[in-house]
């Protein structure tokens, strides 16, 4: 038996079957990689994209020839580490709830594959990686990053006390929209604030889609969400939020004096969001998951437009 083989772990609902973690990773590491959601990279992408947008928008405003590659790499590493840390913290706090929800009962802590003390040790290791990335940034960006930690820490508790936990998640997942700008300009200015506000609304909308996977179990165990609050009106709310997102992003681009490629990227992003609203079926969990995951593609379209807005003028 090779070192990568071992007893098959219970399938986790929103992970792709046959993913590389289950096929290639050593059996002893698989529960920790599952805990950090390495087998489900969409969360890392959604945490990373605002960082990349902010970095590229700052490059546009600064007249740079391209977004800073060093920052793009640092934010990729930091997003992977901090998304994993956030998921670990969430699963520590939610271990009793997860065991009562069909989609989450096979998560490593809820299923007993990872003990709580081991999860805390793994959390500390991931936070150290995130800290190393943060300390590689300018001082103003370091302070800006530290300011997000309280929001990240309290998010898992919000679904117990409010029907709008997605607001807190939106703030946490959108903080990168400030970080790229802060790293380039050592300040937070209007373009970054408009980008941040748009990201918060975007996260609120796409996580409402995601929450429709769990609405029946959430109602049984007493967990609250926008999916339960809005119910049949969810598609209308998501569409309205996406429209606000595009408007705020347009303000961010305008105040940064972005050029045509950035606005073409924003138009592509907007068309993708419109497709999502049309494709959404809140009674089909698989469709909800697929539409939610497609936000990575929408985000990459916008990033490509922003990057081209710096690269093409530099080549001409």
Image (tube, grey):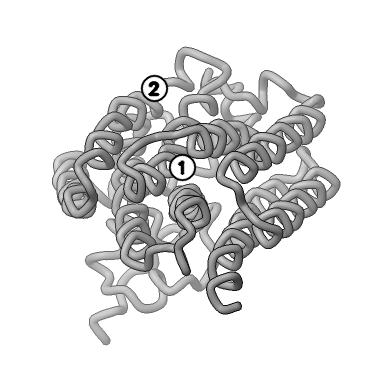
Circle 2 — which element?
A: helix
Camera-nearest label, 1 or 2: 1
Where residue 195 sits, quadrant-wise, is top right
**x, y (%) of residue 175?**
41, 38
Query: Which residue in the structure is indicated by mark 1?
Result: 177
Please, which residue is most extreme toward the front here?
316
Circle 1 — which element?
A: helix
Residue 12 visible in the shown view: no
**x, y (%) of residue 226?**
63, 24
Please, which residue is most extreme toward the right here?
278
Where residue 244 sits, quadrant-wise, is top right
Q: Residue at x 58, y 24 (%)?
A: 225
Above or below for 35 versus 94: below
**x, y (%) of residue 85?**
29, 45
- Horizontally, residue 69 falls left or right of residue 41, namely left
Above or below for 241 versus 297: above
- Horizontally, residue 28 falls left or right of residue 68, namely left
Query: Which residue in the structure is indicated by mark 2?
Result: 157
Residue 123 visible in the shown view: yes
From mark 1 to mark 2, how far is it between C-alphas?
A: 24 Å
């Amino acid at each position: 038996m090779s070192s990568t083989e071992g007893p098959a772990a219970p399938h986790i609902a929103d992970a792709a079957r046959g993913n590389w973690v289950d096929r290639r990773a050593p059996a002893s590491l698989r529960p920790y990689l599952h805990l950090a959601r390495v087998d489900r990279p969409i969360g890392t992408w959604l945490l990373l994209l605002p960082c990349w947008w902010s970095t590229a928008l700052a490059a546009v405003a600064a007249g740079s020839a391209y977004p800073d590659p060093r920052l793009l790499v640092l934010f990729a590493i930091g997003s992977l580490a901090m998304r994993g840390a956030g998921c670990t913290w969430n699963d520590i706090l939610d271990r009793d709830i997860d065991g009562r929800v069909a989609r989450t009962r096979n998560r490593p802590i809820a299923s007993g594959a990872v003990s709580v003390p081991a999860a805390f040790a793994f959390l500390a290791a991931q936070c150290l990686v995130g800290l190393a990335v943060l300390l590689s940034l300018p001082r103003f960006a370091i302070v800006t990053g530290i300011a997000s930690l309280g929001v990240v820490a309290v998010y898992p508790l919000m679904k117990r006390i409010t029907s709008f936990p997605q607001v807190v998640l939106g703030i946490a997942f959108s903080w990168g929209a400030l970080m790229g700008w802060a790293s380039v300009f050592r300040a937070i200015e209007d373009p970054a604030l408009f980008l941040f506000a748009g990201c918060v609304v975007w996260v609120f909308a796409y996580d409402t889609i995601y929450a429709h996977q769990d609405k029946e179990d959430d109602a049984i165990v007493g967990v609250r969400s926008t999916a339960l609050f809005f119910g049949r009106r969810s598609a209308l709310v998501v569409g309205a939020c996406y429209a606000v997102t595009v408007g705020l992003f347009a303000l961010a681009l305008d105040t940064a004096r972005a050029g045509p490629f950035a606005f073409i990227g924003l138009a592509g992003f907007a068309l993708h969001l419109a497709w999502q609203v049309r494709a959404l079926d809140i009674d089909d969990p698989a469709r909800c998951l697929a539409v939610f995951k497609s936000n990575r593609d929408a985000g990459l379209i916008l990033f490509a437009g922003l990057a081209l807005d710096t690269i093409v003028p530099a080549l001409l």
